[in-house]
Amino acid sequence: MIKDKTYRLDKMRIQLEYELNYVENAELRDIIRYRYNDNKTWLQIMFLMNYNSEEKARIKIDQWFADA
């Protein structure tokens, strides 16, 4: 059962990387990868991306999803 879930999770990660290839903005790709693949918090992303606040990455993602 755990092997099945691990296998499904690995497939989902591969699919995420495949879909990220279609995101043209490299900054957004990094934010999405950090948040959903690497399970980073918004605070960790703030430091990784050298932002002034943790809201900046969240706002960028929200805007991108709203435009999509």
Image: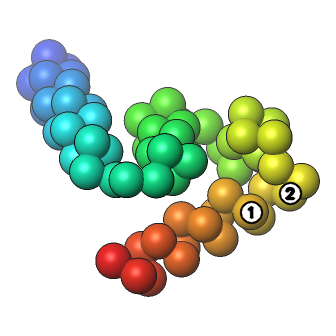
Name which quarter of the figure residue 18 lies in: top left
Name which quarter of the figure residue 4 lies in: top left
The percent coordinates of residue 60 (x first, y second) are 60, 66
Looking at the rendered structure, which numbered label has been put on residue 26? none
Question: Can the viewer see residue 9 in this picture?
Answer: no
Alpha carbon separation for disc pair 1 and 2: 6 Å
Q: As rendered, which of 29 and 10 lies closer to the eye?
A: 29
55 in relation to 19, above or below? below
**Amino acid type, residue under disc 2 in the picture:** Ser
Tell me the residue at 14%/17% (across/down): 3
Its colouring scheme is rainbow
Name which quarter of the figure residue 20 lies in: top left
The percent coordinates of residue 16 (x first, y second) are 26, 41
Q: As rendered, which of 13 and 9 lies closer to the eye?
A: 13
Instruction: Give the side of residue 59 with respect to residue 8, left or right.
Output: right
Assign a secondary structure to mark 2.
loop
Instruction: Give the side of residue 21 with respect to residue 58, left or right.
Output: left
Instruction: Give the side of residue 57 with respect to residue 68, left or right.
Output: right
Counting other residues with Cα less than 10 Å from the Cα at mark 1, is it few (<14), some (14-19), or many (20 or more)?
A: some
33 in relation to 57, above or below? above
Q: Which quadrant of the rendered structure holds the N terminus?
A: top left
The percent coordinates of residue 30 (x first, y second) are 52, 40
Question: Can the viewer see residue 17 in this picture?
Answer: yes
Q: Which quadrant of the rendered structure holds the C terminus?
A: bottom left
Instruction: Give the side of residue 51 with respect to residue 58, left or right.
Output: right
Assign a secondary structure to mark 1.
helix
**Amino acid type, residue under disc 1 in the picture:** Lys
**Contact flag, marks 1 and 2 (Cβ < 8 Å):** yes
User: Which residue is tagged 2?
Assistant: 53
User: Which residue is tagged 1?
Assistant: 56
Tell me the residue at 89%/53% (across/down): 52
